[in-house]
Image (cartoon, rainbow, N blue to C red):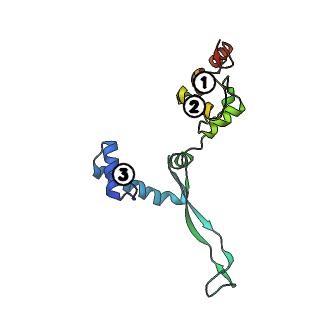
């Protein structure tokens, strides 16, 4: 779907997802559009997508930068404009939510240099560390010329990702330098 969907394709997609008939989806979509037209002056929110507002752009004087009136000041009258502000959830879904880095040094056996090497390899979160096979972690350590035993790191990272910090602390108390004692 690299090309823009036309109305028929949108209706067909929504009908298949909702179990409604294509004609029913068409009437719902038309009513939503009409409601947005009517309520834009009061601001209209489409939950999960964004807000449509009607705003007044004030009159202003503007210096023309090119064209036959270049260098002249022209008066631009006030006018009403429509604005659309995307909801945060829409931005995150479309652009990809910014990935928040976790402090991998919380994992026993991982110091600042190993954490930096993992970050460089794309392992930024506890969840990513937990899902990375031990063999790959060992390869990353070897490539960076670091010594470490990553056999318990996935288990520790899984507990940290789930927010089970008390269990993580108990596990780490039983470890020596990140290894089973």
The tag earlier along the polypeptide, 3 or 1, is 3
Residue that badge 2 annotates: 139
Point out the image quarter for the N terminus.
Answer: bottom left
Q: Quick check: 175 above or below 79?
A: above
Q: Position of residue 119 (x, y in %)?
A: 63, 38
Which numbered disc covers residue 141? none
Q: Report, in whole angstroms, how far the alpha carbon at label 1 lies from the one at label 2.
A: 10 Å
Q: Position of residue 2 (x, y in %)?
A: 40, 56
Q: Quick check: 11 above or below 151?
A: below
Is residue 92 or residue 30 the one in the foreground? 92
Left or right: 111, with 152 as reference point? right
The tag earlier along the polypeptide, 2 or 3, is 3
Is residue 118 or residue 30 the one in the foreground? 118
Residue that badge 3 annotates: 28
Q: Position of residue 58 (x, y in %)?
A: 65, 70
Q: Secondary structure at mark 2?
A: helix
Q: Secondary structure at mark 1?
A: helix
Residue that badge 1 annotates: 150
Q: Are marks 3 and 1 in contact (CB under 8 Å)?
A: no
């Amino acid at each position: 779907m690299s090309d823009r969907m036309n109305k028929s394709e949108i209706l067909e997609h929504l009908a298949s997802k909702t179990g409604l008939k294509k004609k029913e989806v068409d009437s719902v979509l038309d009513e939503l559009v009409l409601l947005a037209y009517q309520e834009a002056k009061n601001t209209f929110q489409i939950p999960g997508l964004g807000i449509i507002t009607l705003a007044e752009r004030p009159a202003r004087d503007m210096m023309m930068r090119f064209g036959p009136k270049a260098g002249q000041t022209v008066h631009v009258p006030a006018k009403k404009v429509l604005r659309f502000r995307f909801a945060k959830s829409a931005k995150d879904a479309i652009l990809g939510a910014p990935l928040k880095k976790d402090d991998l040094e919380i994992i026993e056996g991982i110091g600042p240099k190993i954490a930096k090497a993992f970050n460089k390899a794309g392992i930024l979160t506890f969840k990513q560390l937990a899902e990375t096979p031990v063999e790959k972690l060992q390869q990353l350590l070897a490539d960076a010329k670091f010594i470490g035993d990553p056999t318990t790191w996935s288990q520790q990272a899984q507990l940290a990702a789930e927010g089970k910090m008390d269990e993580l602390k108990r596990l780490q108390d039983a470890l020596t330098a990140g290894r089973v004692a």
